[in-house]
Amino acid sequence: MSVTETRERLLATALELIWQSNYNCVGVNHICRQAGVTKGAFYHHFESKASLFCEAASYYWQVIRADLDSVFSPLHTPLQQLENLIEFVFKSKINTPNKRIPGCPFFNAGAQIGTDDEMVLEALRSLSQTAINYDIALVRALDSAGYLHYKTEPESLGRMMYNYIHGVMSFSHLQPDISTVRKDLPEGLYRLLGVKEEFWFAESATWQSEPTLSK
C-alpha cells in the first residue's frame, strides 16, 4: 500500500467507524486494526486522533460535495432543489426497515463529543457552516422566485433548516414507523420555510442518484 493509499485508508476507516459509533468510542488501535495498518503508519500521517478527526471531516466533505452540488444545481428550479434535498436526506441519512443508516457522522459526533479540543470543535463548526451555506442559497432562490410568504433572513432560516433536518434524523432512530418521518420532514420544511401553500409539493425531485456514502 502506498503512502497516499495508507492515508486515504485511515481517513475512510475513521469516517466509517465514527459513523457507526461515535468519536469517543473509536480509538487509535481500533482504527489501525480496521484499516490494516500499524500505529507507526498512523502517527506518520496524523499527530493524534483529534488530528485524524479533523482531516476526516474534510475528507467527508469532499466525498459528499459532488452529491450536494448535483442536488442544488441551478439546472433545477428552487422547488425541485428543495425536493432534491428531501430525497437526498431520505436516501443517505435516514433508516429504512431494510437498511440502517446512522445519520450524519459529524453532526452526531458534535452532539456526543463533549470535548474542549478547539481543533475538533472548529472542524465541526466549519463542516456544519459549509452545509448551511447550501441551505442559505436555497432560501434565497426560493425567495427570489416568489415562493415564500414573507421576507426572511436567509442566514437565519438556512441555519434553522439545518437544525430541523438533523433533529428529524435523530428522531428517526427512535421511530420504527418510517412513514411518520416521511410525512414530517417534507411538510416541516415547507412550513418552516414559509412556502406558499399553492406551491407545496408542486414539483418532484429531479435528483435520482444513489448518494455516494450509501453505495
Image (cartoon, rainbow, N blue to C red):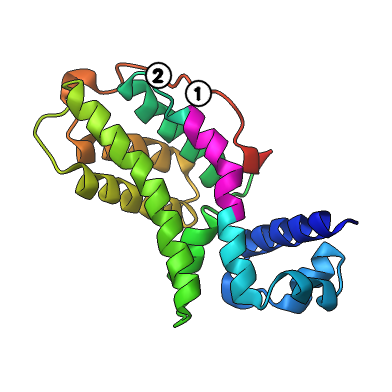
Dot 1 alpha-carbon crowd within 10 angstroms: few under 14, some 14 to 19, many 20 or more: some
Where is residue 95? Give x, y as percent.
55, 46
Question: Which is nearer the eye, 23 or 9?
Answer: 9
What is the magenta range? 59-70
Q: Are marks 2 and 1 in contact (CB under 8 Å)?
A: yes
Q: Which residue lies under the disc numbered 1? A: 207
Q: Main secondary structure of the magenta part?
A: helix
Q: Is residue 2 above or below residue 82?
A: below
Q: Which residue lies under the disc numbered 2? A: 76
Q: CA distance from mark 2 to mark 1?
A: 9 Å
Q: Is residue 168 above or below residue 52?
A: above
Q: Is residue 4 magenta?
A: no
Q: Residue at the spot x=62%, y=64% of the render?
A: 18
Question: Which is nearer the eye, 146 or 58?
Answer: 58
Where is residue 85? Give x, y as percent.
42, 34
Dot 2 lies on which element?
loop
Quarter of the figure that contains the C terminus? top right
Where is residue 14? Give x, y as percent.
68, 63
